[in-house]
Image (cartoon, rainbow, N blue to C red):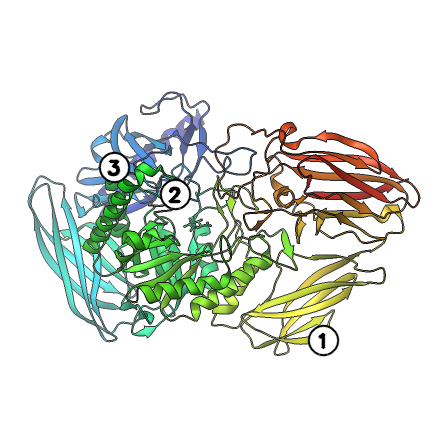
Amino acid sequence: MKRYVCMVMVILFSYKFTLEAQVRSVGRSKVSFDSGWLFQKDSIGDAVLPNADSFNWQSVQLPHTWNDKDVLADGKRGYYRGIAWYKKSFRLIPESGRQYFLQFEGSNQVTEVFVNGKFAGKHIGGYSSFNVELTPFLNLSGEQYISVKVDNSFDKNIPPLSADFTFFGGIYRPVHLITTGDKHFSMSDYGGPGIYISTPKVSEKKAEVIIEYHLQNKSNEKVKLSLETFIRKDTESVLAEKRSNVTIEASSNMIFKVTFKNVENFELWSTEMPVVYYVESSLKENGKTLDNLTQPLGFRWFSFDANKGFFLNGKNVKLIGANRHQDRIPYGNALSNDMHRQDMQLLKEMGVNFLRNAHYPQATEILDNSDQLGFVVWEEIPLVNEVNVSEEHNQNAENMLKEMIKQHYNHPSIFIWAYMNEIYWAHRFKPEQEIPIRNKATLELTQRLENLTRQIDPHRYTAIAMHNYSLYDESGIGDIPMIAGWNLYHGWYYDKYEDFGKYMDEQHKKYPNRIHFISEYGAGSDVRLYSEKPEKFDFTMEEQVRFIQSLTSQIIARPYISGGAIWNLVDFSSERRVDATSHMNNKGLVTHNRKPKDAYFLMQALLSEKPVATFGYPFRTDWKHIATSPSDTLVPVRMYAFSNCEKLSLLINNQFHSVSQTRNGMAVWDLSLPEGKYVFSLQENSKNVQNKSIQTKLIPYQFETNKEIDIAMNLGANYAFIDSRTGQYWLPEKEYSEGSFGFIGGKQLYVGDKIGTKEDILAVDEEDPLYQAIRVGMSEFRADVPEGVYEVEVLMVEYVPKSRRFADEDKEVTRQPNKRIFSIFANESLIEDNLDLGANYGLNVPYRLVFKTKVTKDNGLSIKFQPIKGEPVVSGIRIRGVGY
Ligand code: GCB
């Protein structure tokens, strides 16, 4: 009884509270609408109508994606692309004269919203914000029910059709409930704020500010309203203000412009001092506020020059920064605002001034932070790789462009609007007969999107990102945008580092009037791979550093290249991708969980204004080395630090060791250390800046006892693989020499001109790089070990003999019998007879052969690979002494 009374009181109280709130509601309110949702994937029926049966529905909080897990390494390709439902009941007593909207910041990719069982709106496209009006569908009783159908299936008319990233499905950005009066700033202008601020003329002292208001009168009466505009820096200081009277016809929209001819006494927005002002606008009727909204404003002027690059407020500024994708393991693309902010802080701390929001418009939080932190931003729509020849496709692309520009128009950080990325990428896979019609359609769409961009926003630059494919020049597409963006990977996917500069110099010579920007350059790295001999496409930490060092300095050395952006700030999900890390693109400067890699610290050293000094190898503590002779007692350690200081000192175990001059962002020490534990200290100007503990281990040339033996060798590779789960260290391969151990015969596998295969090795995701490196045609692995029992592991896989970036959506394992057959012997006893990896296991399916064998006195251990057909393949060998 007592409980019942309490409940009634709570209901009465909340009812009263709601009523009071209604009476008081003025202006605009915006509250989060992210909690209390139920979710179901693969729903058999739909959830349009309220249904008490929520069996099997999952409780979720937005932002949410349903692909957070199935895109991870799971032994199979593909992830759920289809329909899912969200539903939520809530209480809202609609007040007359008020309008109610849901604002979705991002839902991928087709979203249909139902309110109390009625269709309320649909949105196509996964990367922009949209509003759905609830008002006409709300129940006066206050009990409301909303359901949302989201579909991320492939649709040939919705870009992106294909791309190197995962198309996570879900309501993956926040949703807000917005309430306004019945006369308000437009809520139906492509998701834009209905207030568009431009600064056509800015100088150091004076600026012209034009504000275009899109107003909506939803009442049945013609009304006279007053519109108040304040330009403020903060609550105290008003820079300019204006009150205007506007008359709007019944049930209609109008555009009204407010111009401030001469705004003075402001500070400029720059990448070093990003001063953001606010335009505060209120729409009032008889003194009562119906709607109010604040938008950012920055005072700056800028231009690009085909020879001299970029100028901001009259000053030549080289733009250097990174591209950013928006996902993170294990959250998929459903990142919290804290996570977005963390990315922006990482970028800022790196000392750069540029961000490319690739390949789609990003969260509001990213744009707000760009304004505040001072990034020059390039933003683009997700038109990637290819177009579909259809008007519906083109209209969707246009719509996305309008949404992006309108929604982010007021952000002072936006300087470049782009609308295509590598649009000829899929060209070479298309049937010959389709080519002319595709080419024509692509060219026409480019011109159409260019015209549209310039028409909506004549104050910014336009761009497309191209790759090194001659069709961009031949078709004339390269001449359409104001900026020619280039995604170049010389020295990674193709050619050599130096070819990058040559390529660009040729472009500059051929097209002297084009403004060039390097929209992408990058190399992959896996924090488990280390090499003393880094090479193209080996995914070692050292190679990513070398690549970035070379291309960044080539960009900086060329004034006509206005800027460059590393691909990518973060390791990101690309479900179909084949790389050292399966299902991921690991060209990040930071790992997917935002831990800076060596290349991040290099960028910081090259670009930061403040002094920085950081040891390399943030993920590595162990250095192992196989002695090169019986008397060798030292482990070579090439330690480096990233810094912009002139020179740095190294101390080892508190003892001064030496000073190293920094060159190109790096100070290097080539050390030879006896086995042991060390504490390294980095000093700048006698001040300790960082300590790092490492451990060195010498694998003897020759072993004396069985028990000390544990040799693990990454055959076919010049790099070590350190298993992140256990620390198990697989040494780079070594050739056999008398009295010691190693491989005999064969060669390292190169597919194309790249070391190893980069295929996804099924079922052993954590060990992919180990299997990917392969020694082909090895006749024997010999170890002159003392007598005893040894456990031997032989790692093998039949590889896909081509170099591809993306795996097909294999439904089942491909068997390929008879490609190679070999037998394996251990000290003459047959272990595997006529092994046919392609037949028994299939392509990319690993075979880990484990057996024990006894070695008798002075015989050593010999594992022989006897070819019967083709050449044997071996990826790794481990030999462990296990007694006698
Ligand atoms: C590119 C694409 C980008 C890819 C990148 C890569 O040029 O624009 O989407 O992720 O290359 O890593 O291959």
Mark 2 residue element = helix
Dot label at residue 656: 1
Mark in front: 1 vs 2: 2
Vertical order, 251 against 591 (above or below): above
As measured in the structure, the alpha-carbon distance from the residue carrying label 2 to the one carrying label 3 is: 20 Å
The location of residue 244, given as percent across then percent down, is: 11, 59
The location of residue 54, given as percent across then percent down, is: 42, 24
As measured in the structure, the alpha-carbon distance from the residue carrying label 1 to the one carrying label 3 is: 69 Å
Nearest to the observer: residue 771 or residue 317: 771
Cβ atoms under marks 2 and 3 closer than 8 Å:
no
The residue that label 3 is drawn on is 390
Q: Residue at left 59%, top 59%?
A: 542
Mark 3 residue element = loop
Nearest to the observer: residue 405 or residue 220: 405
The location of residue 683, given as percent across then percent down, is: 63, 74
The residue that label 2 is drawn on is 428
Q: Earlier in the sequence, mark 2 or mark 3?
A: 3
- In the current view of this chain or complex, which residue is farthest to the bottom? 685
Cβ atoms under marks 1 and 3 closer than 8 Å:
no
As measured in the structure, the alpha-carbon distance from the residue carrying label 1 to the one carrying label 2 is: 58 Å
Query: Ligand 1 closer than 8 Å to the CB at disc 1?
Result: no
Look at the image and tell me whether residue 798 can be seen: yes
The location of residue 855, given as percent across then percent down, is: 88, 40
Mark in front: 2 vs 3: 2
